[in-house]
Amino acid sequence: MIQNERDCRHEHVLDVARQMLTAARTAPKGKGIDVIEAALVTGEDIKKLSEKMVAMVEEHGMKFFLRDADNILQAECVIIIGTREQTQGLNCGFPTCAGRPEGVPCALNTVDVGIAVGSACAMAADLRVDTRVMFSAGLAAQRLDWLKGCKTVFAIPVSASSKNPFFDRKPKEDK
């Protein structure tokens, strides 16, 4: 049997993405408490994510969401990684966790999601697929509530093509 790389690339990228999910899950966590949620976005759901990003430009005016919305459509899949809000019982700049102002994320939870994202991207790099960490797509996934209860979400589009589509990007204009 002869398998052309172009014919099996998509399944390979999905396999790598699943390994990225495992890397995020097994990444070190503050106090050893796992507050990470992660999921794999494929097919029509990537289009829904892109559409949500475009709609969000009206709300906040951040034009780079338009560029990123177009950019994720070039991905084979998108990994989303977030953290549930859970106090850790440590002093991270406030006298107590309860004393932290409303809307200010727990520092340990934020560090944990960063480590998980880094671990997932390291796995992707080890397996030679292209990625980019996107705040914009993560915020859209959060607004879509795809990771239930997560207050901080980042997205990682994944691709295996002859040139990384997530770099050398040009700004998009309103349509």
Image (cartoon, grey):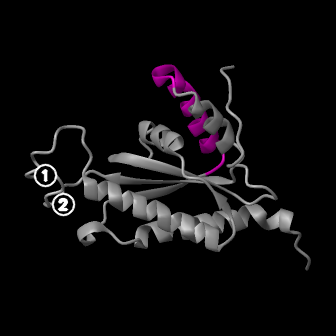
Res. 106 visible in picture: yes
What residue do we see at 91% from left, 80% from top? Answer: 1
Residue nearest the viewer, comparing 66 with 170: 170
Residue 44: percent from the left, percent from the top? Answer: 64, 42
Left or right relative to 129: residue 88: left
Label 2 belongs to which residue? 88
- Of residues 17 and 64, the one drawn nearer to the viewer in this rendering: 64
Secondary structure at numbered mark 2: loop
Identify the residue shown where x is 46% and y is 21%: 59
Magenta stretch containing residue 115, yes or no?
Answer: no
On residue 125, which mark appears?
A: none
Magenta portion: prevailing SS class: helix
**Span of residues in magenta:** 42-61
Q: Are marks 2 and 1 in contact (CB under 8 Å)?
A: yes
In the image shown, does 64 or 9 lie closer to the viewer? Answer: 64
Q: Quadrant of the C terminus?
A: top right
Kind of residue at badge 1: Cys
On screen, 171 above or below 92? Answer: above
Crowding at mark 1 (Cα within 10 Å: few <14, some 14-19, many 20+):
some
Identify which amino acid the numbered label 2 is placed on: Gln
Determine whether 114 is above or below 119 in the image: above
Residue at the location (13% across, 50% down)? 94
Label 2, label 1: how far apart the Cα atoms are: 7 Å
Q: How many marks?
A: 2
Indicate whether residue 54 is drawn in magenta: yes
Residue position for label 1: 97
SS for dot 1? loop
| In this picture, residue 88 sits left or right of residue 18 | left
Q: Position of residue 30 (x, y in %)?
A: 27, 67
Give residue 171's position: percent from left, percent from top.
Answer: 67, 32
Q: Position of residue 54 (x, y in %)?
A: 58, 28
Mark yes or no: residue 33 visible. Answer: no
